[in-house]
Amino acid sequence: MQKYHLIDEKFMTFSLNQEEYAVSMDKVLEILGTERILDSDHADSCVRGVIHSRNHTVRVFDLQCLFGFETRAKKEGASVLVTVFGSGLTRVGLMVDSIRQVVPIMAGFSEKLPTEADDPRDKFVLGQVEVEGRTIRLLNLDKWEQYLPSVSPA
């Protein structure tokens, strides 16, 4: 099993399709409600619209759709994590089911996710860790830019 070394840092955890995921707090700009999503012209079925964040118009992607789960309408209690990646110039909103908490994940190893051959999550998830008896899948935003359609620096 392949392992990845992690730096000691804090992660924002959230739920999606009854699983728990996390993104580095260094990548999170803010958390907004889905009621702020505005419809926009978009060809990609995983784009839910745009949201205005800190004087930027940010495209919002539904993680459920990107991960190959059944798509749904805006869910009550859902949130948008406004994130940055790449050189820090690209802003993207990630629609999630609910925000959980900030957890410190100490230096250690994350195990590669046990997925099926064509699992869409493989390109987005670095691996998983066990924290307080919970399995948390860690997102690797640094390589997302190559997989998200029509995302440009904001």
Image (cartoon, grey):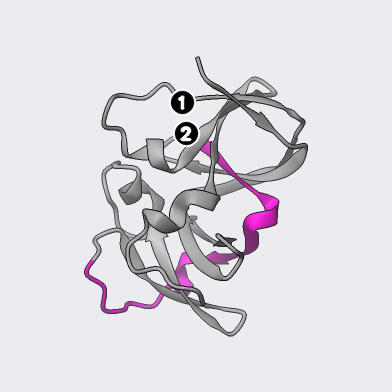
Viewer-closest of 51 and 124? 124
Residue shown at the point (44%, 43%) measured from the top left? 124
Q: Is residue 30 covered in magenta?
A: yes
Q: Where does the magenta region start and end?
A: 19-43
**Label disc, if present, on residue 2 of the rendered structure:** none
Front position among marks 2 and 1: 1
Q: Viewed as shown, does residue 134 lie left or right of 107?
A: left
Q: Amino acid at mark 1?
A: Leu
Residue shown at the point (57%, 70%) measured from the top left? 89
Mark 2 to mark 1: distance in Å? 13 Å
| Spot occupied by residue 67 in the image (x, y as percentages of width and height) | 35, 43
Q: Quadrant of residue 62?
A: bottom left
Residue 49 shows up from this direction:
yes
Instruction: Identify the secondary structure beneath mark 2.
Output: strand
**Label disc, if present, on residue 19 of the rendered structure:** 2
Q: Earlier in the sequence, mark 2 or mark 1?
A: 2
Q: Quadrant of residue 27?
A: bottom right
Viewer-closest of 145 and 125? 145
Q: Viewed as shown, does residue 108 lie left or right of 63?
A: right
Q: Amino acid at mark 2?
A: Glu
| Spot occupied by residue 19 in the image (x, y as percentages of width and height) | 47, 34
* Residue indicated by mark 1: 113
Q: Quadrant of residue 61?
A: bottom left
